[in-house]
Amino acid sequence: MFIHLQRGKFVCLPDDYEIRDASLQDISAALNPRFTKEDVAKLDRNHDLSRDLFGKVYLPGYVGLNNLNKTDYVNACMQALAQVKPLRDFFLKFGTQQQQHLKAEDKYSSLALRFGELMRKMWSNQRFKSSVDPHEMIQAISAASNKRFHVGKQAEASAFMSWFLNSIHIGLGGSSKKRSIISKIFQGEIELTIRQRVNVKKAVNNSSQLGKLRYL
């Protein structure tokens, strides 16, 4: 019996037929969690603790990430991004139809896909373990950054965050001219204040004449 890691379907080989059994749904849900709009809307009101297979309680969205040898800076950034509500909601509702528009063979699109998977696992209440292994996320980061950020090499969290957000922006089809969910959230706005240039001589003359009128 085998499971398709992307679709979550169980298949019996070599007979090649799908196995449909309710007892296997927990495995599929833990492997690839799914969220409806109603599920996402309830997240911020949820204070109920969940239990893993070992009976350890955890609060979905606030789970540990395994350190894969000097990848603590990546974990810190992932934990921070998991709490950005509009970003979290976007990737939790990131369905199969949306994923089909991304090219899995493209390193930036693959990075966006892996990030979405990680977010859904972190916020799932049907985990087998109360912690999450970001192994696939780290692999995608290493490939997309040409090993600038990879296992065994420490890096600054600020440098990684800047690179990561820009890469996810590109992976979702964004560019310098086309916006994405990343640019909508993190790009911000610029406030411009315009001041009119004043002619010094005219200003002095006007002020002197005003002074004379007041004096008279």
Image: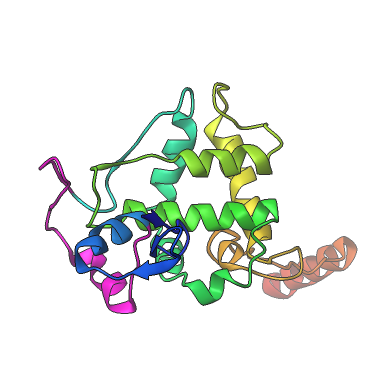
Measured from the top left, where is residue 2 in percent x and y? 40, 54
In this picture, residue 12 sits left or right of residue 108? left
Q: Residue at x 82, y 66 (%)?
A: 198
In this picture, residue 21 sits left or right of residue 6? left
Which quadrant is the N terminus positioned in?
bottom left
> Quarter of the image holding residue 29?
bottom left
When the figure is inspected, residue 93 is found, relative to residue 67, above or below; the finding is below
Residue 137 on the magenta span: no
Q: Residue at x 49, y 36 (%)?
A: 74
Measured from the top left, where is residue 153 in percent x and y? 58, 22
Q: Residue at x 63, y 72 (%)?
A: 101
Measured from the top left, where is residue 105 in percent x and y? 69, 56
Residue found at the very far front of the displayed protein? 15
Frontmost residue, 173 versus 102: 102
Q: Residue at x 41, y 46 (%)?
A: 80
**Residue range of the region highlighted in magenta in the rendering:** 32-58
When the figure is inspected, residue 67 is found, relative to residue 143, above or below; the finding is above
> Quarter of the image holding residue 168?
bottom right
Measured from the top left, where is residue 147 in percent x and y? 67, 32
